[in-house]
Image (cartoon, rainbow, N blue to C red):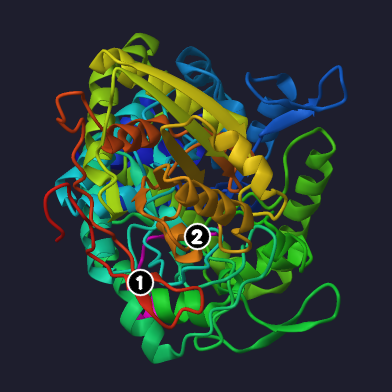
């Protein structure tokens, strides 16, 4: 075997690395992965090394006939040339790229066929919940919903389903799990993407998720180091600051990363956040403003904490560099160079590769890094180190470019068994936060239900599942819908009274009330005056009840249709609302369709944040409170 490996290395030395490595060659290289990685990188040009450090998105390519960005759904000569000639190491795909299983399989096969040398890392963000990328796939109810189940086995099951479906499509890395501790109720970007505000629960669920997904040879990436849970602004549009002191950070944010890294995590994704307690070195933004260094650009954080203190030697991947926190504040060539010097191995999305004009910007970035590497031995060393780390991980994981079997993918992705398991998990998660003898609502032969939410798609989804419940229980449900912006102050009491007239039950589906709950409060007030029962469905974060008074019944479902800022797109999380609605009702024989089982995975505090209204672990049932 040793002689065969040496022979393969000699052959590799003689060939051009611009040629795709065949499966036979890969099989030989896998026999001594460390030596193979050393030899591969030794024979790479500087441009080939840089290529291994980039993960680009081709979310769109050029414009359609209406002048709108055209989603990139199938390989074309221009993109194939970019991947091959720039020796690209990795590609990330988004919801825009993924229509259905046949198209996804074909696109990923085409991407791998366009490679320059080694097989590509093909990644996506299938976190579960509302951050999911597969349009046809099994989302699972999301991390905070898993937190509400308190069941590590269900986190492992979620990882297995994600791993099975993604690997069947040709993906080899998933950007998850999120191990941020959501200890800031006002966090605008993490929220239900986090398992909990309890670090031990985050540790248990994230590591079991990793255990599940690893059964299908999929790499994982922890999000978002050094912890994105305690912020009040969104790094997609801003540069958030974490004001915890070092002691608080080490006691809360750090432990889940430490625990997951010791339990098999493959990569760590950086956060575009400022943590002065870890790095207060000043840098200037494009506007000339002095700020502390964001973690993605911070050597004290990435090298000092991750590499030196935690002894972590796996991949460090940046969060998307085109997010506002970086792109709006720093020159991108400088930011990429600085992030590499800080310790990053893979630079995610430094350029929006959405049209042929972006190729010029990519070329300039390569030239910049090559030029700077000639002048800066430290940068040259960092490029070598990271290229070797990326190549070694590909060999260790035995990443292949073999075409994916479409027939198998169609049997696996969104299979009935996966969808049934998805519903089972979500039914375990629904949390009854408050109930003043309103629930379960026992269905009568005839029922008139008013459905109110911020968006028509949500109302339509709720109506669909009310119809399913009517069919299941043999009753009639006449549902009326009203689309009302609940976090605004636009309604009059007379308008609400008109909507309430003749209704037996009101389902008030809230999404985010922390800024202005006026319309939602008016609905609750007027319904209470008329003695019409109102159930507040907290459809995303469970905190909405903190901003309302007089609520008699409230459930948290941890996800519904809504805008996903991580993808600039809409997602529909159907399993959560299905399970939530089933939790509200009992059949005419007074048997609950889904007795509530979930426990709050977070504390719900008052708007001032100085009093806990509903503690971690709270959850009512239809018999007792526990």
Residue at image point 62% right, 36% down: 498
Is residue 17 in view from this perspective?
A: no
Image quarter hosting the C terminus = bottom left
Determine whether, in the image, residue 214 is placed left or right of residue 331.
Answer: left
Q: Is residue 164 above or below residue 553?
A: above
Determine whether, in the image, residue 31 is placed left or right of residue 453.
Answer: left
Determine whether, in the image, residue 445 is placed left or right of residue 76.
Answer: left
Determine whether, in the image, residue 487 is placed left or right of residue 155.
Answer: right
- Compare residues 378 and 265 and report the one nearer the observer: 265
Q: Is residue 393 above or below residue 275?
A: above
Residue at image point 39% right, 35% down: 577
Q: Position of residue 183 (x, y in %)?
A: 41, 72
Q: Identify the residue under disc 2.
A: 386
Is residue 212 in view from this perspective?
A: yes
Q: Position of residue 52 (x, y in %)?
A: 55, 48
Q: Position of residue 531 (x, y in %)?
A: 42, 46
Q: Is residue 83 above or below residue 331?
A: above
Q: Identify the residue under disc 1.
A: 613
Q: Which residues are magenta?
A: 307-319
Disc 2 vs disc 1: which is toward the camera? 1
Q: Position of residue 71 (x, y in %)?
A: 69, 26
Q: Earlier in the sequence, mark 2 or mark 1?
A: 2
């Amino acid at each position: 075997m040793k002689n065969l490996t040496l022979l393969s290395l000699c052959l590799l030395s003689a060939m051009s690395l611009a040629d795709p490595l065949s499966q036979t060659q890969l099989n030989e290289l896998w026999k001594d992965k460390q030596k193979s990685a050393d030899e591969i990188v030794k024979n790479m040009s500087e441009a080939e090394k840089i290529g291994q450090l980039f993960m680009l998105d081709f979310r769109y390519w050029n414009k359609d006939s209406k002048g709108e960005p055209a989603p990139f759904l199938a390989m074309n000569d221009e993109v194939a040339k970019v991947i091959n000639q720039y020796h690209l190491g990795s590609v990330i795909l988004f919801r825009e790229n993924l229509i259905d299983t046949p198209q996804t399989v074909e696109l990923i096969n085409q991407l791998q066929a366009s490679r320059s040398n080694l097989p590509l890392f093909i990644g996506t963000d299938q976190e579960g919940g509302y951050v999911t990328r597969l349009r046809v796939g099994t989302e699972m109810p999301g991390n905070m919903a898993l937190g509400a189940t308190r069941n590590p086995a269900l986190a492992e099951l979620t990882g297995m389903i994600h791993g099975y479906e993604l690997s069947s499509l040709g993906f080899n890395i998933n950007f998850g799990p999120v191990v941020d501790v959501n200890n800031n109720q006002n966090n605008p970007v993490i929220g239900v993407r986090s398992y909990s505000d309890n670090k031990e629960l985050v540790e248990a669920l994230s590591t079991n998720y990793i255990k599940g997904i690893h059964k299908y040879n999929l790499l994982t990436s922890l999000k978002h180091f050094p912890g994105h849970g305690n912020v009040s602004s969104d790094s997609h549009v801003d540069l958030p600051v974490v004001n915890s002191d070092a002691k608080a950070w080490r006691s809360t944010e750090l432990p889940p990363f430490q625990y997951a890294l010791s339990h098999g995590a493959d990569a760590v994704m950086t956060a575009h956040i400022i943590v002065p307690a870890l790095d207060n070195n000043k840098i200037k933004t494009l506007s000339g403003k002095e700020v502390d260094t964001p973690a993605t650009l911070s050597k004290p954080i990435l090298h000092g904490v991750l590499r030196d203190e935690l002894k972590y030697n796996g991949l460090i991947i940046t969060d998307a560099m085109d997010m506002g926190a970086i792109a709006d504040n720093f020159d991108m060539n400088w930011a990429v160079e600085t992030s590499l010097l800080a310790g990053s191995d893979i630079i995610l999305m430094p350029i929006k590769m959405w049209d042929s004009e972006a190729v010029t910007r990519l070329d300039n970035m390569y030239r910049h890094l090559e030029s700077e590497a000639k002048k800066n031995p430290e940068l040259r060393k960092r490029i070598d180190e990271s290229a070797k780390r990326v190549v070694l991980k590909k060999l260790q994981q035995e990443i292949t470019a073999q075409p994916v079997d479409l027939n198998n993918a169609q049997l696996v992705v969104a299979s009935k068994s996966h969808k049934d398991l998805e519903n089972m998990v979500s039914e375990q998660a629904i949390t009854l936060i408050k109930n003043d003898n309103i629930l379960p609502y026992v269905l009568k032969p005839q029922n008139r239900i008013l459905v109110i939410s911020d968006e028509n798609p949500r109302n339509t989804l709720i109506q669909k599942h009310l119809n399913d419940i009517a069919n299941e229980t043999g009753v009639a449900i006449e549902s009326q819908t009203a689309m009302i912006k609940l976090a605004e102050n636009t309604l009059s009491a007379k308008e609400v009274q008109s909507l309430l007239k003749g209704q037996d039950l009101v389902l008030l589906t809230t999404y985010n009330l922390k800024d202005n709950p006026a319309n939602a409060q008016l609905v609750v007030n007027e319904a209470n005056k008329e003695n019409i029962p109102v159930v507040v469905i907290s459809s995303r974060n469970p905190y909405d009840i903190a901003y309302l008074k007089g609520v008699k019944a409230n459930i948290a479902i941890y996800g519904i249709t809504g805008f996903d800022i991580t993808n600039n797109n809409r997602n529909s999380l159907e399993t959560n609302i299905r399970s939530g609605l089933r939790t509200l009702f009992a059949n005419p024989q007074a048997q609950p369709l889904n007795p509530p089982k979930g426990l709050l995975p977070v504390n719900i505090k008052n708007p001032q944040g100085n009093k806990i209204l509903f503690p971690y672990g709270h959850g009512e049932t239809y018999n007792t409170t526990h």
